[in-house]
Image (tube, rainbow, N blue to C red):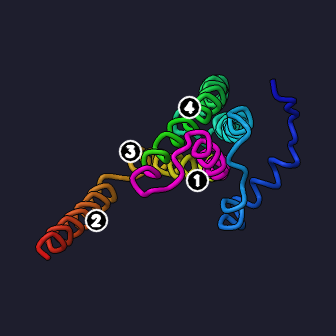
Amino acid sequence: MNDLKLDLQKIFRETTETLLNPKEYFSSMSLEGGYIEPIIKAAIYGVVAGLFSLLWSLLGFSPMGGGGIWGGAVGVMALIWSVVGAIATAFIGGALMAVISIICGGNRDLEANVRVAASLMAVYPIRAFLAFTYGISFALDKHAEDVFAKKLNDEQRDLAEGLFRCLTERASQHQDDRESF
């Protein structure tokens, strides 16, 4: 059994290199050493991404949970599934990369490709952090619905519907124009 110790500073350095200097990192990364290290790296990325999902759910920035107890329940499941999904994605991504490598004449070793896939997952926490923008968009849409339904009088509602219809019909006409090219 390998004498494996968890070196968070090394993982942080490798993550920084993956994001800021990917060409040098991937050309010099270790392609051997077992599956434990990439699994741990993927799990760490999953935990960080899951914590962001939990936070956004608790704050009501998630379309699934509106904050409070339901947001917390959704957030806890998002945390759990982020970790499970990250580990599964490292292996699925590694298998897909191995197939592409075989086709392109690259490295055929599954372990090396799983290590690359796990390293590429460094963007997963960043994506999860930026996911709050979707929650803001969702909240604004909900607010606009409420304003439209409750705060506009009939004349204002007719004007808004006409404007919306005009915009959507105009957009569909342009879609037809693009398809003719």
Tell which of 92 and 2 is nearer to you.
2
Dominant secondary structure of the magenta stretch?
Answer: helix
Local crowd size for mark 3, using a 10 Å CA cut-off: few (<14), some (14–19), many (≥20): few
Q: Where does residue 49 sit, x and y in percent of width and height?
A: 67, 41
Which labelled disc corresponds to residue 133? 1
Q: Quadrant of the N terminus?
A: top right
Q: Residue at the location (82% across, 55% down)?
A: 13
For badge 4, the amino acid type reads: Ala
Q: Is residue 149 visible?
A: yes
Q: Are marks 2 and 1 in contact (CB under 8 Å)?
A: no
The residue beneath circle 4 is 88
Q: CA distance from mark 2 to mark 3?
A: 16 Å
| Tag 2 near tag 4, CB within 8 Å | no
On screen, residue 9 versus residue 133, left or right, reads right
| Residue type marked 1 | Thr
Q: Earlier in the sequence, mark 2 or mark 4?
A: 4
Looking at the image, is mark 2 or mark 3 nearer the viewer? 2
The mark nearer the N terminus, 1 or 4, is 4
Which of the two discs, 4 and 3, sits closer to the camera? 4
Whole-number angstrom distance, CA of label 2 to CA of label 4:
47 Å
- Which element carries disc 2, helix, strand or loop? helix
Q: Amino acid at mark 3?
A: Ala
Q: Which mark is residue 163?
A: 2
How far apart, in angstroms, are the residues tagged by discs 1 and 4? Answer: 26 Å
Q: Which residues are magenta?
A: 100-127
Q: Which residue is mark 3?
A: 149
